[in-house]
Amino acid sequence: MKLTQNVPMAGRRQVLKLLGAVGAVAGLASLGALPRAAEAATGLGVPKPDEKVEETIKRLFGNRTLQTAGDKMKVELPLIAENGAVVPVRIESNLPMEVNNYVKNVYIITDKNRRPLNARLSLTPEAGKLSLATNIRMGGTSDVRVIAEMSDGSLWQHKQEVKITVGGCGG
């Protein structure tokens, strides 16, 4: 006795229709017509090509006021960087890191970069005292902003010019 199952086979037309639909969705996604999951999850919005720093700040923070951090945040940046491809940034802060009052995000923004937002670092109260270090890439001499966003929505900013001598346009 021979058992056989009748499994429907997809015809050539059905396969071509499916491939066409997949191609159309991929094309729309690459053009930005469909929301990207990462952008939807972060709430950062979509940066424009060659976005100006004012547009970036408006997109990220709306109409909230940027307050000068002063002694609330210590940022170490070189005054002159020999290579714009590797510019070290070190951030320390005595801003509170308590359950109801903490640094929620730290943004590093380079004013004259083609896309000014270099990094967004998200934190929780469990992180403890804020102490971060990273390298950023700069296209040339520019102001660099480090902005701490608190859980209550307040914003604290440190701003400093960094001159680039090689790998950028120089100052």
Image (cartoon, rainbow, N blue to C red):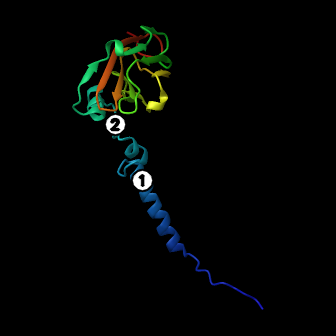
If the image is split into quadrants, where does the N terminus sit? bottom right
Q: Quadrant of residue 75?
A: top left
Category of crowding for the residue at label 1, using alpha-carbon neighbours closer than 10 angstroms: few (below 14), some (14–19), many (at least 20): few
Q: Position of residue 62 (x, y in %)?
A: 24, 34
Among all residues in the image, which is located at the extreme front? Answer: 99
Q: Nearer the viewer, residue 79 or 132?
A: 132
Q: Residue 100 carries which label?
A: none
Q: Residue at x 34, y 28 (%)?
A: 149
Vertical side of 62 occupied by 87: above or below:
above
Among all residues in the image, which is located at the extreme left? Answer: 63
Q: Mark 1 points at which residue?
A: 27
Answer with mark 1 or mark 2, whichever residue precedes in sequence.
Answer: 1
Q: Which amino acid does label 2 sit on?
A: Pro
Q: How many labels does the image show?
A: 2
Q: Which amino acid does label 1 sit on?
A: Gly
Q: Mark 2 points at which residue?
A: 47
